[in-house]
Amino acid sequence: MSDGNEIVETQVVDGEYVGVAGKPLTVHERFAANLRMLADWYEAHPEIEIPAGEIAFYIFPGGEENVPKVAHAMGKARKGTIGDAYFKLERFFGDKLILRACWTREAVCKRKVIGQRTVEREVPVGYRTEKTTEDVVEWECPKVMAPRELAEAAEQAGGE
């Protein structure tokens, strides 16, 4: 007897990928299906703008023992850092999508002192309180109507 969560292939029912029959969806299969749903939606709605810039997916695979496994799976990946805190591997999928695997730098990199330098910094020696005038604002955003409300509004506008 099937519990309804088994699949051999997926199909879209009411905007959701569901299994037809067979094995249960793994978390990876469900994520891939969700990405396909997004791609299908964008193909069906060319009137909607695509997100500006790049879209990054972040994963945090744990300790340094996982770096070789992730690097191997990512294939041609670019390594780098995020600020002073994180080591990253990046895999680009086209010109918009990035998969970033991140580790705390201390977990995967070894700190090595290679010299010393003298730097000049401003150090705060005190604070003072000032009164200033600033705008108090309120945002008026357009109301978003449900599709049925849009149809009713269109009918009313056409009937006048």
Image (spheres, grey):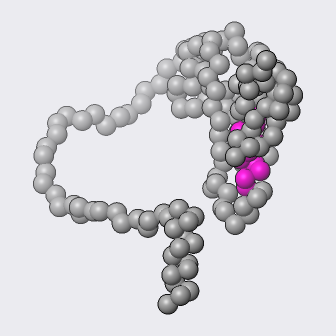
- Using the image as rendered, state which of residue 9 and residue 160 is in the foreground: 160
Please tell me how many numbered marks the rendered image carries.
Answer: 0
Residue 35 lies in the magenta stretch: yes
Taking 129 as reference, is 6 left or right?
right
Quadrant of the image occupied by residue 126: top left
Q: Nearer the viewer, residue 114 or 106?
A: 106
Q: Where in the figure is residue 40, as x and y percent of width and height?
A: 77, 50
Start-end of magenta stretch: 32-42
Q: Residue at x 31, y 37 (%)?
A: 122
Residue 99 picture location, percent across and down: 70, 34
Please report the residue visible at 62 percent of the width from the left and 15 percent of the height from the top.
62
Left or right of 131, for residue 95: right
Q: Is 81 positioned to the left or the right of 120 in the image? A: right
Q: Is 75 drawn above or below residue 159 in the view shown?
A: above
Q: Residue at x 77, y 29 (%)?
A: 29
Quarter of the figure that contains the N terminus:
top right
Taking the image as drawn, is residue 135 in sight?
A: yes
Q: Quadrant of residue 22?
A: top right
Considering the whole magenta stretch, tell me its main secondary structure: helix
Q: Position of residue 135 (x, y in %)?
A: 24, 63
x, y percent for residue 158: 56, 86
Q: Nearer the viewer, residue 153 or 33?
A: 153
Vertical order, 18 against 62 (above or below): below
Q: Nearer the viewer, residue 147 or 120?
A: 147
Q: Is residue 128 above or below residue 45?
A: above
Give the side of residue 125 with respect to residue 50, left or right.
left
Q: Does residue 29 show up magenta in the picture? A: no
Farthest residue in the front direction? 1
For image coordinates 75% across by 35% down, the residue present is: 18
Q: Is residue 35 visible?
A: no
Query: Which quadrant of the figure has residue 10?
Result: top right
